[in-house]
Image: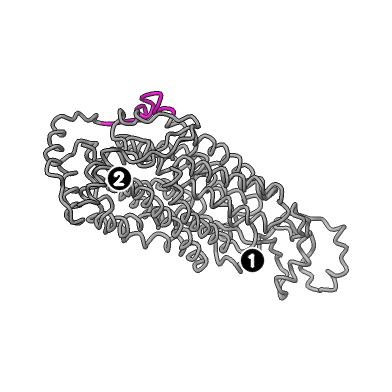
Amino acid sequence: MDLDDVLPEVGEFGRYQKLVLWFILLPGVFPCGFHAYNQLFMAAAPDHWCKVDGFTGKSAKLIRNISIPTAVQLDGQTRFSQCTMYDLNYTNTSLEFYESVNYTTVSIVPCKHGWVYDKQGHENTIITEWDLVCEKDLFSTIALVLFGIGGLIGNYLFGYIQDGIGRKPSFFIYLFIQSVFGMATAFATNFTAWTIFRMGVGFTVPAILSTPYVLAIEIVGPRHRTLVTILVNIAYSLALVALAIIVWVIREWHLLALATTIPFLSLFLHWWLLPESPRWLLAQGRVREAEQILIQMARINGKKLPYNFVSELRREEVQSQVPSSFGIRHLFHSSNLRWKTIIITFIWFTNTSVYVGLSYYAPALGGDEYLNFFLAGAVELPTYLFLWPAMEKWGRRWTLCVSMVVGGSACLTTFLVQNDSVITLALYCVGKMGISSSFVVLPLMASELYPTVVRGLGISVSSMVGMLGPVFIPLVNYLGSDMLTLPLIIMGTMLVMGGACSLLLPETLNQHLPQTLQDAEKAGLDCFACCTPPQLDVKMQALHESRLQS
């Protein structure tokens, strides 16, 4: 007996699921949102210029004007040099002396005595504390790359942990790791230690998001998967908005590390409240444990289990022969599942690369970086107004395709207006809305295509390959210092390619979640077919109609 057959009887989205979703799963989304991007502000690089030793008693602005050369940048703006200074004898404090100097004949040399930082926007960052500028300006980018490598490793292991010991313990193991390294970050005394601690945090990002997401999908019926998926993503967007406010208020990196970690220690109290996934328990042959959860679900929802469901479960417990473990090879068990895995993984790579890339790139767009990051998170929220009806009417596949192609086209168009910062920012927001939409649809569609026995592993493998994006995308964004729109053009091309590939996947709207590898074979590749989204299965439709009549 399929769990989707009994959920209409015990409540597909009743009081039980709502309590678990609102008070346990949605708060569990916030740690990932905070720790994925707080590093951008801990390692923010304020404006800086060479420090002049011995020249005192004058304002910093005056000292900069007489000691720092200017140059025209690629964007046509004239700015003070950040890494060079005029080679003069600054022990002379007479202003008349500097007014008489012919600066065209004065040698320009690298900074000799360190740097002066404009701390108007940043009280203290690792850049200002450890002078990670000029010849060390790549260090913060390398730290982001290593953060991504940590996530790559963590995602790979998380799939085995989640499918091996369950959704619930996996979440708390990763929450513990994230909390320990997150707090340790605040006490790092040098860049090497800080980077190691950040890799520890990166080990859990975005893997820790998988449990709230997968568990939310697995405890509700097919008709409500779209809703819970959107709610989880709304929570993630709100986490980014909340982070933007926190980093605007707290501009000292030690305090910021603690402020974005300590509040989540309260989530450990959810250990006694968070249920294990009954789908996972059934797939593992742990029928009695699944039975207890379903009985509790029915009781809180004011329902009763079907009279024959418990006996059917126990009969299947005796008859079932569940493999002791599943591995990556099972994702390539057949040609059908193999191609689904390859396509999902490629789309996941493009989505992760572009979503993280655009989020990383927000502070580099010019203007107020705090406001830019706030908008980068806030602009995701309007997309959910049309995303829900779109997924229910058009299905997952076409919604995914349109979102990626529209977002990618907006990024590509920035090449035509690269000298207009306002239009570039507007197109960036359209691109962010497109990738945000596709990032909602893809995990849902992947969860509905991978069978339960390898769902956690499949999502983990796809997201693990996707995490190659955050490894190289900081380097792509680093190129934006020379050409602002170049990273947007690269990311736009990736989005359009991923959108085209999405049409190869079968539609999953209103379909049963596949439990076994054999179930996954029932839906083949559609090869760009423009089909009407499938309706509810006949058996499930009859159950819903009987509920309405009762």
Q: Mark 2 points at which residue?
A: 218
Which residue is drawn at the image coordinates 45% and 48% (left, top)? 440
Type of amino acid under label 1? Asp
Start and end of the magenta stretch?
325-339
Which is more toward the observer, 153 or 360? 360
Disc 1 residue crowd, few under 14, some 14–19, many 20+, Cα 10 Å: some
Reply yes or no: does residue 331 show up in magenta.
Answer: yes
Q: Position of residue 549 (x, y in %)?
A: 22, 51
Residue 283 drawn above or below residue 411? above
Q: Residue 438 carries which label?
A: none
Reply yes or no: does residue 345 show up in magenta.
Answer: no
Q: Where is residue 189 in the image (x, y as percent from the top left)?
A: 48, 57
Type of amino acid under label 2? Glu
Q: Is mark 1 on a helix, strand or loop?
A: loop
Which is more toward the observer, 507 or 260? 507
Q: In which quarter of the image is residue 507?
A: top left
Left or right of residue 512: residue 38: right
Q: Quadrant of residue 21?
A: bottom left
* Mark-to-mark CA distance, 2 and 1: 50 Å
Per the picture, the main secondary structure of the magenta-coloured stretch is: helix
Which is more toward the observer, 130 or 311? 311
Which is more toward the observer, 315 or 420? 315
Q: Position of residue 115 (x, y in %)?
A: 66, 61
Quadrant in the picture for the N terminus? top left
Residue 43 drawn above or below residue 517? below
Q: What element carries label 2?
A: helix
Q: Mark 1 points at which residue?
A: 118
Which residue occupies the extreme front position in the image?
549
* Earlier-in-chain disc, 2 versus 1: 1
Which residue is drawn at the image coordinates 45% and 34% (left, top)? 505
